Image (cartoon, helix red, strand yellow):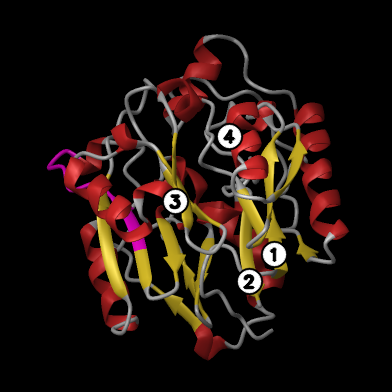
Amino acid sequence: MRLNIKNETGRLKSVVLGQPNSLGAVPTLEESYDAKSYYSIEHNIYPKEEDIINEMNAFEAVLKKYDVEVLRPSIIKDYNQVFSRDVAFVIDDKMIISNVIADRADEQEAYKSVFEKVAWRKIINLPETAHIEGGDVIVWNDFIFIGTCFSEDYRNYKTARTNEYAIEILKEYFPKKRIIDLELKKNDKVPFEGILHLDCTFNPVGEDKCIIYKNGFVDESDYRLIIDIFGEENCFHINDEEMFEMFPNIFSIAPDVVVSDKAFTRMNDHLRNVWGMTVEEIPYREISKMGGLLRCSTMPLVRE
């Protein structure tokens, strides 16, 4: 397979979609590893496997409608494999294997058939102490935006998934890219007060536009930098409640085609009526209760 990911919105040709089957039992509060899951468990609204299967089937149907090749990881019994974005990710023609948190370490075994399609020279394995997950990495032509946590308490946060060491290594592998690190607010238990991954607070769409949540960044200067790069008129701003519902985490099939949750009425109307996009709406409310949405569920491999 000839990997090719230059940005977030080029016409999608091949993607890995997560696996909804055999989720296992509802985790305990202690077993949760993100604030949204913690909230769902605490309020007894954690999703049922049947509903997750239905939502992912709807997503797969849309992808296939646009002739996208859809690969799936093999099933690990009683294991959550919905969010393929964080297991590995592609920049240009290279696949970076993530060093995910220990709770998800077994997940990578299920992607063996995918990894085997990629030439070994194109796969980057990071040192064990370089932590990074695909949800924190946004490739945008000459830029790579990376969400991170610089806090001295980094090791105490389950939601701190990407560290400074991993960013420095990516700078060595991609010296011609402008790599911008963006520090995110972290909270393991209160989803209104922390950001799991960068794509939960910022996501490019179209050719030159983005969805952004100002309060997700530790430093307002990081938010301002994104506004300067994209232009104020090209930014769709979301509020606290919309961040909680995961508005930024939609997925682009092409510059003019996005897949979005049908509950995101205000944003979908803007994308459709103001920015002229085709918005494929599907139900994804149940999956959102586990701390991820549409972008989190995908690992793009090839875009035009």
Mark 4 or mark 3, earlier in chain:
3
What amino acid is labelled 2 in the image?
Leu
The vertical placement of 96 against 103, above or below, is below
Label 2 SS: strand
Task: Choose mark 3 or mark 2, whichever is in front.
Answer: 3
Dividing the picture into quarters, in which one does residue 299 lie?
bottom right
Amino acid residing under circle 1: Val
Q: Which sits earlier in the primary sequence, circle 2 or circle 1? A: 1
The reply to whether the magenta stretch includes residue 163 is no
Which residue position is annotated with label 2?
301
Q: Residue furthest left?
A: 152
Of tags 4 and 3, the one toward the viewer is 3
Q: Which residue is mark 1?
A: 15
Where residue 75 appears, x then y in whole percent?
75, 51
Disc 4/disc 3 C-alpha distance (Å): 13 Å
Mark 2 → mark 4, Cα distance in angstroms? 27 Å
Q: Which residue in the protein does label 3 denote?
A: 234
The picture places residue 293, in percent across and down from the top left corner, at: 60, 39
* Crowd class of label 2 (few under 14; some 14 to 19; many from 20; radius 10 Å): many
The numbered mark, 3 or 2, whose residue comes first in the sequence reads 3
Give percent across and percent down for residue 173. Answer: 33, 82
Identify the residue at image location x=28%, y=36%. Answer: 157
Q: Amino acid at mark 3?
A: Asn
Depth check: give the residue in front, 16 or 110. 16
Bounds of the magenta segment: 145-153
Q: Quadrant of the N terminus?
A: bottom right
Q: Residue 29, how many percent across, how many down?
A: 46, 19
- Distance from disc 3 to disc 1, alpha carbons, whole Å, reads 27 Å
Q: Is residue 215 above or below residue 162?
A: above
* Residue to which mark 4 is pinned: 267
